[in-house]
Image: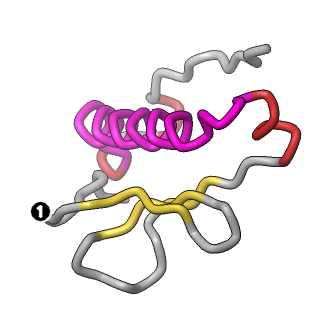
Amino acid sequence: MKGFEMSPSFFEIVQLSNGDYALRRVDDDSAPLVKISFSSEAKEMMEDRDMAVAKAMIAAGIEAAGNISHDIELEDEEPEALDVQPSYTLH
């Protein structure tokens, strides 16, 4: 598996007609790169801050993908050689 690479482009976060949020290339009408969907309960808890939360989630995802692509070259390493981090459940 090659590292995560994105061609130079401008991206935008949009709200879709169904209320979901999506990250897409400005100059491309194809399927979004990422979609985020909040339940009605989550929307109530966010009190109209769902766009800000979606932006933060997408930014964190892009940063994480960039870190992964620079820190780990999966095609050159054996699976047992990867530094496996414990997973945590946030409440």
- Height in image: 7 above or below 3? below
**At 55% across and 23% down in the image, what residue appears?**
84
- Depth order, front residue of 34/87: 34
Residue range corresponding to the magenta coloring: 46-74
- Main secondary structure along the magenta-highlighted residues: helix
**Residue 49 placement (x, y as % from top left):** 60, 34
Secondary structure of residue under mark 1: loop
Residue 49 within the magenta-colored segment of the rendering: yes
**Residue 20 placement (x, y as % from top left):** 64, 60
In the picture, residue 8 is in which quadrant?
Answer: bottom left
**Residue 60 placement (x, y as % from top left):** 43, 33
Residue bearing the label numbered 1: 8
**At 55% across and 34% down in the image, what residue appears?**
53
**At 34% across and 52% down in the image, what residue appears?**
75
- Height in image: 83 above or below 79? above
- Depth order, front residue of 16/3: 16
Residue kind at label 1, given as amino acid type: Pro
